[in-house]
Image: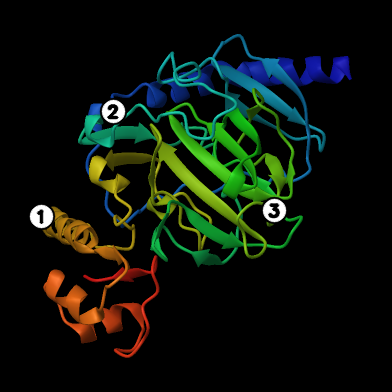
Amino acid sequence: MKSIKLYILSVLLLVASSAFAQDAEGAKESADSLQGTSKEQPNPVHPVRTLGKVAVIDTLPTGNDALSIVLFNDNTWRYILSENYKNDPDIFSDHWNTSATHVYTDIDVNSLPEATALRLVDSLESYHYPYMGRITSRYGPRKGRSHQGIDIGLKTGDPVYATFDGKVRFSKYSGDYGNLVIIRHNNGLETYYAHLSQRDVEVGDWVVAGQQIGLGGSTGRSTGPHLHFEVRYKGQSFDPERIIDFNSGDLRRGELLLRRRHFSIYAKYEQDFGDEEEVAKQEEAERKAAAAVQYHTVRSGDTLGALARKYGTSVSRICQLNNIKSTSILRIGQKLRVR
């Protein structure tokens, strides 16, 4: 085995330097050059080879600290950027907590820049879809809760893959998420893979795009087998469809200008973001509509007529909002939507 590794290494090192030079040039370009992105993506990034159960047998150096060669047990190999090559030297130390699901609780969304330029992949195009399946629930409000990712239908035991190269920050059972794996990537993004029936990686593992990190399942708060997939930046979630076309499995773009307003639970990718002013107005209207929703907890002596007068509405409107009749008996402690 040692002789095979040395032979492969001697051949690959001949091209490693030029490959790395090209990659480093692209990876170090200033983020300031990024322009606003649109839904039209002429050059989507296609997934790398599906690794599935193909195992990494060794990682070889190339003479450049940033570039390594990974050997797989099916006699294939590919370049990867090493853990030491980061956009931010503190990326794997700042808010690095392996026992907490959400670690950026001290960062307010309003403290983040209006726009952040993120390089999603380097010139090696290390990307893979997490799972190819039908989306069963999209990002956004859902039954009075904030659904901060997307759900993809699968069968228990189906393989789930790492989307980008990165380091496992969290791998354990976590309440509603069930079996959860969180991977932090070189650009500061974190991807969440929830409801797994099995976790194949541990905290601190360095994984590559397309590596199997677990098996799909229905653990935690789940009504059936599916993958709940989230993408977060500094703890703030945004619509995963903003970066991945889940119909084709392709990455929509290699670079993303992530705007602060994208962190709104109402900022879905399928909206038309061509007219920034109109979108801002739409989001503001949605926020106001959500804030205008009012509930009342029924107390002794409350009647529908009295509640209608108190909240400046009508009995028929209260009945419509709560799917009740004007003759319905109110129960103490019952919550009624009044606006």
CB within 8 Å, label 3 to label 2:
no
In the image, is 253 to the left or to the right of 262? right
Q: Is residue 263 above or below residue 25?
A: below
Q: Position of residue 267 (x, y in %)?
A: 29, 55
The structure residue drawn at horizontal position 24% and vertical position 46%, both measured from the top left corner, is 261
Tell me the kind of residue under disc 1: Glu
Give the labeled residue for mark 1.
Answer: 277
Say whether residue 104 is left or right of residue 305. Answer: right
Q: Relative to residue 29, is residue 8 drawn left or right?
A: right
Q: Which numbered circle lies on residue 216?
A: 3
Alpha-carbon span between mark 1 and mark 3: 41 Å
Nearer mark to the viewer, of 1 and 2: 1
Q: Secondary structure at mark 3?
A: loop
Q: Residue furthest front?
A: 301
The residue wearing badge 2 is 31
Q: Earlier in the sequence, mark 1 or mark 3?
A: 3
Q: Is residue 131 above or below residue 316?
A: above
Q: Quadrant of the C terminus?
A: bottom left
Q: Position of residue 94 (x, y in %)?
A: 44, 18
For label 2, the crowd category at 10 Å Cα-Cα, with few meaning under 14, some 14 to 19 and many 20 or more, is some
Q: Between disc 1 and disc 2, whose residue precedes? A: 2
Q: Is residue 268 above or below residue 172?
A: below
Q: Are marks 1 and 3 in contact (CB under 8 Å)?
A: no
3 or 2: tag closer to the N-terminus: 2
Question: For mark 1, does the 10 Å Cα neighbourhood hold few (<14), some (14 to 19), or many (20 or more) residues?
Answer: few
- Amino acid type of disc 2? Ala
Q: Which residue appears at 28% of the width and 64% of the height?
A: 295
